[in-house]
Image: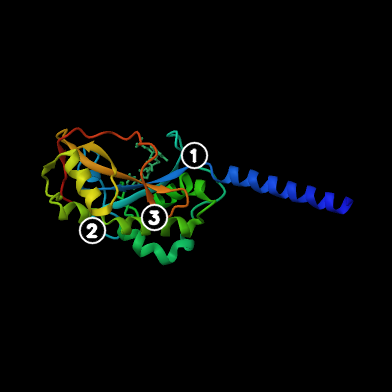
Amino acid sequence: MAAARLSLSILLVVLAVAAGQRAAAQDYDFFYLVLQWPGSYCDTKQSCCYPKSGKPAADFGIHGLWPNRDDGSYPQNCSPDNAFNPSKVSDLLSSLRAKWPTLACPSGDGLKFWGHEWEKHGTCAANVFDEHGYFQAALRLRDQLGVLAALTSNGVKPDGGYYTLSQIKGAIQDGTGFEPYVECNRDEAGNSQLYQLYFCVDAAGDSFVECPVLPSGRPCGNRIEFPAF
Ligand code: 5GP
Ligand code: 5GP
């Protein structure tokens, strides 16, 4: 009897600890997958620098996979001890160079950008991803969308032309099944241009979902330039 009571108490303690760890470990509700259009990153006063590996393809690149809460807030820099280690993603480096290129100046090899994203955002999803899993998931999710094909097959082309917000959202919804939040920046002449797309992914980092809350990025107006790259 005493032994049964003792093992019940031990079980309760183990369950309580496990629940506490889960609550502490998953401090977010979903992810934003944020893609950037390189032509718009470059086509500002600030300009850009191509990575050391050369000019990236004219396609959407990854900015990051960001854990976020339903109330719009987000955790960041969750494990300062868990610094980015390139050797853990050595098999992904050529995909990262192609699909997650850095455009900041001075020219880099991408390690700084990826390291920043892992340390600021990735470490906050340690309940589902180790470093390799984090980058692999972002690459898979980006490929699954095929955003550029969705746009171009609906007549929205990176040709320096202007499109409405509903044309852009409609084309992406039609081609991918999901409607992104569209963030714009300004070209040198002050025109609004298609800069970043935010898609939402479930807390497991697995599947796209409707966004529980929209990000606070700069909105677009209704005349949006899609610059060439
Ligand atoms: P975040 O804005 O994600 O906190 O930070 C992005 C950081 O990565 C900034 O320090 C920015 O300079 C650097 N970075 C390097 N390459 C890129 C790039 O291609 N796009 C963006 N948005 N940031 C980049
Ligand atoms: P910005 O002020 O340029 O929009 O964002 C700067 C950085 O803050 C982003 O690169 C990202 O690291 C972080 N950030 C901005 N907005 C959000 C958001 O809504 N959710 C998350 N998780 N991070 C964000």
Instruction: Kindly identify which residue carries mark 1.
Output: 75
Instruction: Kindly identify which residue carries mark 2.
Output: 57
Q: Residue at x 64, y 45 (%)?
A: 19
Q: Nearer the viewer, residue 78 or 17?
A: 17
Q: Which of 116 and 22 is in front in this view?
A: 22
- Give the residue type at disc 1: Pro
Q: Does residue 199 appear in the picture of this structure?
A: yes
Which badge, 3 or 1, is on the more N-terminal residue? 1
Q: Where is residue 218, by image quadrant? A: top left
- Mark 1 CB lies closer than 8 A to ligand 2: yes
Q: How far apart are marks 3 and 1 (CA)?
A: 18 Å
Which badge, 2 or 3, is on the more N-terminal residue? 2
Q: Distance between the residues labelled 2 and 1?
A: 32 Å
- Give the residue type at disc 2: Ala
Q: Nearer the viewer, mark 2 or mark 1?
A: 1
- Mark 2 CB lies closer than 8 A to ligand 1: no
Q: Which of 64 and 143 is in front in this view?
A: 143
Q: Which of 60 and 154 is in front in this view?
A: 154
- Give the residue type at disc 3: Ala
Q: Where is residue 78 in the image (x, y as percent from the top left)?
A: 53, 43
Q: Distance between the residues labelled 2 and 3?
A: 18 Å
Q: Position of residue 97 (x, y in %)?
A: 33, 59
Quarter of the render that holds ligand 2: top left
Instruction: Kindly identify which residue carries mark 3.
Output: 138
